[in-house]
Image (cartoon, rainbow, N blue to C red):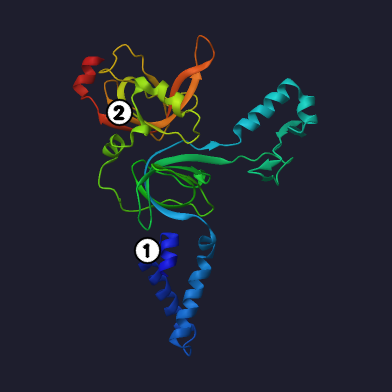
């Protein structure tokens, strides 16, 4: 049972309680059976119930979640490109297998012959949405070990809500482990169970003490992106001053902030931060820490993707001005 506990991240006391409950029921059903038989049967029942979890290569980790993206469809780009082609040249889109017509309407097809080096079983069939979100934070193996930053691609994102700053137990597939970071993908057994915190410091302190490679000032963010922009799992921690704040959602549901650093450069216009619905925005004059992913947005004058944008996964206040100060600024 100790091995099951370590494999699944379930306290051994919980497993023992389940076994004892099974034994009590089995004794009523089989009063003539020996204690050894009852115990073996109870363990067999528990093992059968846990078999799916035990077969999975996913391992348990304790995690402090300090950011996550909005749920997105990983196949949205393929769908958009196929429909754009259909608008431009319907015959070509149909002949080349990008879409088919159903009741006169285009249905996008899956054109990928392989996925991950293996034949795609859905090749040529309607393209299904694959919903996912990125979850980031600090994690530690359930059985103990170093605490590291983590990045998890959660493909079951639509099934469970998360909260910023909460501590969870989850099981996932470890794809890569680096000196300061773990990269995960979710498994069919991945779920988030809220547990007691395993770290003593608050989120802001932990973010401020993160390894230097994950931190950057707003002014140096373009240089940081030039260095790490090719990393699909990049996450940056930016502490700065709120220069502009708009809490009215855009068409995409995001709110907007502009973050700079008044102590470094008063003339710096700030970095645009897209703030998702699960994060708060803070008024001008606040100092915040933004955890997110850098992207390149289009320059309004040239149309080229050269403008650094920060897509927030989490926003934390370091300082928020008083109402009296805000009234003076109004």
Q: For the point 50% across and 38% down, which residue is it?
A: 71
Label of residue 11 in the image: 1
- Residue 146 spot, x, y in % from top left: 35, 49
- Residue 113 spot, x, y in % from top left: 71, 40
Residue 125 lies left or right of residue 137; in this view the side is right
Q: Is residue 54 among the parts visible in the rendering?
A: yes
| Crowdedness near tag 1: few (<14), some (14–19) or many (≥20) residues, C-alpha within 10 Å | some
Q: For the point 41% across and 44% down, which residue is it?
A: 162
Task: Give the mark nearer the N terminus: 2 vs 1.
Answer: 1
Q: Nearer the viewer, residue 37 or 232?
A: 232
Q: Is residue 28 among the parts visible in the rendering?
A: no
- Residue 23 spot, x, y in % from top left: 43, 78
| Crowdedness near tag 2: few (<14), some (14–19) or many (≥20) residues, C-alpha within 10 Å | many
Q: For the point 42% across and 79% down, which residue is it?
A: 24
Residue farthest toward the front in the current orientation of the protein = 179
- Disc 2: which residue: 288
Q: Nearer the viewer, residue 72 or 28?
A: 72
Between the residue at mark 2 and the residue at mark 1, the CA separation in whole angstroms equals 37 Å
**Secondary structure beneath disc 2?**
strand
Residue 95 lies left or right of residue 272; in this view the side is right
The N terminus lies in quadrant: bottom left
**Secondary structure beneath disc 1?**
loop
């Amino acid at each position: 049972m100790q091995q099951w506990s370590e494999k699944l991240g379930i306290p051994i006391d919980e497993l023992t309680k389940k076994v004892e409950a099974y034994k009590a029921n089995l004794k009523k059903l089989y009063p003539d059976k020996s204690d050894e038989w009852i115990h073996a049967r109870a363990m067999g029942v528990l093992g059968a119930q846990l078999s799916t979890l035990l077969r999975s290569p996913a391992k348990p980790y304790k995690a402090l979640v300090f950011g996550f993206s909005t749920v997105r469809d990983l196949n949205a780009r393929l769908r958009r490109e196929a429909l754009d082609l259909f608008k431009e040249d319907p015959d070509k889109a149909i002949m080349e297998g990008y879409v088919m017509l159903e009741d006169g309407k285009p249905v996008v097809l899956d054109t990928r012959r392989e996925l991950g080096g293996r034949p795609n079983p859905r090749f040529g069939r309607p393209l299904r949405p694959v919903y996912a979100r990125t979850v980031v934070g600090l994690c530690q193996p359930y059985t103990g070990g170093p605490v590291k930053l983590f990045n998890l691609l959660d493909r079951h994102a639509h099934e469970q809500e998360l909260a910023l700053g909460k501590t969870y137990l989850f099981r996932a597939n470890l794809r890569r482990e680096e000196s300061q970071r773990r990269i995960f993908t979710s498994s069919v057994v991945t779920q988030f169970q809220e547990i007691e915190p395993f770290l003593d410091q608050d989120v802001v302190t932990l973010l401020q003490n993160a390894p230097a490679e994950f931190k950057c000032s707003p002014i140096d963010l373009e240089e940081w992106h030039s260095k790490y922009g090719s990393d699909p799992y990049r996450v940056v921690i930016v502490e700065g001053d709120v220069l502009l704040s708009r809490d009215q959602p855009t068409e995409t549901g995001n709110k907007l902030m502009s973050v700079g650093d008044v102590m470094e450069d008063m003339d710096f216009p700030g970095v645009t931060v897209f703030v998702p619905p699960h994060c708060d925005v803070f008024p001008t004059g606040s100092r915040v820490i933004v955890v997110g992913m850098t992207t390149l947005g289009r320059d309004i004058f040239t149309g080229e993707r050269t403008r650094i944008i920060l897509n927030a996964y989490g926003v934390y206040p370091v300082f928020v001005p008083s109402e009296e100060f805000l009234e003076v600024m109004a």
